[in-house]
C-alpha cells in the first residue's frame, strides 16, 4: 500500500506583472504538504508559461525572501515577487 | 522613519526629520519621475508595493547601512499609486557627522532599494504601458 | 543658481529650482553646523566670504562638473554671517537624468567648494574661537 | 647714475584670520612697479610674521587665483586668501 501525500490549499498573492499574468491578484492552489518554494514556483510557471519570460520570479514567505528549498507551511503568507523596480 | 505613502512626498518634511545638532551633513536623494525612457515619451507612472514587506526590507537595508556608516537619523518615503511627471517617487534623507558617510549611506540605500524592495513601477506611454525591468 | 546669502537657506526652494521633467534624480547636500568639533562643544559659527570671487569660483566648479556629468539644473547657496547650531551653512542641489550623475556631481561640488572657494568659518567655543583650517 | 624703480601704492584687502593678523581689513603698501605676487606675499609675511604660521596664504588678483610669478599692476583688486573653510 502506498501512502498518499496529504494535500493543502494555499493562496498566493500576486503584484505587478505577476497579477497581470495570472489575471487576478490571488491564486489558490492545491499542493502537496512539504512542498518547497522551488517546486511551488515550478508549478506556477507550468500553469502560467508567461512567467518564464520574466527576468526573475521569487516567492516571499511571511514577508521574507527565503531559500529555494524552504518548505511552505499551511497558513503561510505567500506572495509572488516579479522583478522589482522601485525608486 | 520609513513609510510607503499615497501622498505627494514633501522633501522638506524628511529633511526636518533628520536634522540633528550632531550632524555636519545631510544628503537627500530624490527619485523623480522622468518624462522619457530610452527616447520614449512617458505620460505617467504608477507604483505598486507589497507594503509590509517593503517596509521590512527597507529596515534591513538601513540596518546594513548603519553597520557601515555613522548614521544619526534617516527618513525614507516611497510613493505608491499614480505619480505625475516631475513628482518625487522616492525621497531618502540621511544625517551624519561628516559628509562622506551621508553620501555613501544615502547612495547605498537607494541602490539596495532598487534591488530588493518589493515595489513595482509601471510606465505609461502614448501607445501602451510596461512594468519596468520585468523582462530581460 | 549660485548665491551667497545672509538669510537662512530653505532647501525646499533650491529643490524646486532644480526640478525638471527630464530629471530622474535630484541629489541635495546640506552642510549643517555641528554642535561639536573633535570633542569640543561649539556654541555658534560665523561665515565670512569674499563674495564676488566666491561666486566666480563656484561657477568654475559647476563648469567642470558639467563637463563630467549630465547636469540638468543646479542650485548652490552658501550662508554668511552668524549661523546657529543645526542650521544649514550650505545647500547644493543637482538634477540629472540618472542617479549616479546626481551623487557624483553633488559630491564633487562640495569637495571642490571646500578646497578653493574664498569662504571662511569661525567656530566659537565656551573658551574662545578659531578660524577653521587656518593652522596646520 | 642708477635708475630708481618706480613705486606704486597698492591696497590689499584681508578676510578671516588675515584680517585678524593685520588688525584691519585693508593694508596699504608702497611697492616697486613690476612686483610679482610671490614678492608681495613675502613682503606681507615680513611685516606680519604670524602669517608664517598659517597652512597657506594666497593673493587673489581681480577675483582670480594667479600664478606666483604674476605681475601686480597698479589698480588691481588684491585680496589675501588665508586657508578657506567653507561648507
Image (cartoon, coloured by chain):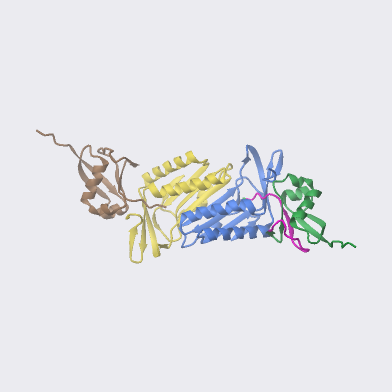
Chain colours: A green, B blue, C yellow, D brown
> Residue lying furthest bottom in this view?
C126
Question: Could you tell me which quadrant the N terminus of chain D lies in?
Answer: top left
> What range is drawn magenta here?
A65-86
Residue A68 belongs to the span the image colors magenta? yes
Q: Residue at 29% of width from left, 52% of height from top?
A: D18
**Horizontal and vertical percent for residue B104?**
51, 53
**Horizontal and vertical percent for residue C20?**
56, 43
Q: Residue at 45% of width from left, 47% of height from top?
A: C109
Residue B68 belongs to the span the image colors magenta? no
> Residue lying furthest front in this view?
A1
**Horizontal and vertical percent for residue C59?**
42, 42
**Horizontal and vertical percent for residue A22?**
78, 50
Q: Can residue B26 be seen in this snapshot? A: no
Q: In this view, does B70 lie above or below C59?
A: below
Is residue C53 rendered to the left or right of residue B23?
left
Is residue B43 rendered to the left or right of residue A46?
left
Is residue D32 rendered to the left or right of residue B70?
left
Q: Can residue C116 be seen in this snapshot? A: yes
**Front residue (pair D16, D55):** D55
Q: Residue at 30% of width from left, 54% of height from top?
A: D17
**Front residue (pair B12, A52):** A52
Is residue D87 rendered to the left or right of residue B79?
left
Q: Magenta-highlighted stretch: main secondary structure?
A: loop
> Residue lying furthest top in this view?
D1
Amino acid at each position: 500500500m502506498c501512502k498518499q501525500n496529504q494535500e493543502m490549499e494555499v493562496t498566493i498573492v500576486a503584484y505587478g506583472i505577476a497579477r497581470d499574468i495570472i489575471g487576478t491578484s490571488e491564486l489558490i492552489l492545491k499542493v502537496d504538504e512539504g512542498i518547497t518554494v522551488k517546486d511551488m514556483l515550478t508549478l506556477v510557471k507550468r500553469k502560467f508559461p508567461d512567467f518564464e519570460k520574466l527576468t526573475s520570479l521569487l516567492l516571499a514567505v511571511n514577508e521574507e525572501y527565503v531559500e529555494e528549498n524552504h518548505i511552505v507551511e499551511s497558513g503561510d503568507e505567500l506572495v509572488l515577487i516579479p522583478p522589482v523596480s522601485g525608486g | 522613519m520609513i513609510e510607503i505613502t499615497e501622498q505627494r512626498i514633501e522633501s522638506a518634511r524628511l529633511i526636518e526629520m533628520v536634522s540633528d545638532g550632531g550632524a555636519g551633513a545631510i544628503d537627500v536623494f530624490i527619485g523623480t519621475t522622468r518624462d522619457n525612457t530610452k527616447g520614449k515619451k512617458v505620460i505617467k507612472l504608477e507604483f505598486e508595493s507589497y507594503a509590509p514587506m517593503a517596509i521590512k526590507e527597507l529596515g534591513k537595508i538601513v540596518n546594513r547601512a548603519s553597520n557601515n556608516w555613522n548614521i544619526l537619523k534617516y527618513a525614507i518615503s516611497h510613493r505608491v499609486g499614480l505619480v505625475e511627471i516631475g513628482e518625487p517617487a522616492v525621497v531618502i534623507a540621511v544625517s551624519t557627522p561628516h559628509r562622506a558617510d551621508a553620501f555613501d549611506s544615502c547612495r547605498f540605500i537607494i541602490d539596495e532599494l532598487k534591488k530588493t524592495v518589493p515595489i513595482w513601477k509601471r510606465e505609461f506611454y502614448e501607445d501602451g504601458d510596461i512594468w519596468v525591468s520585468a523582462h530581460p
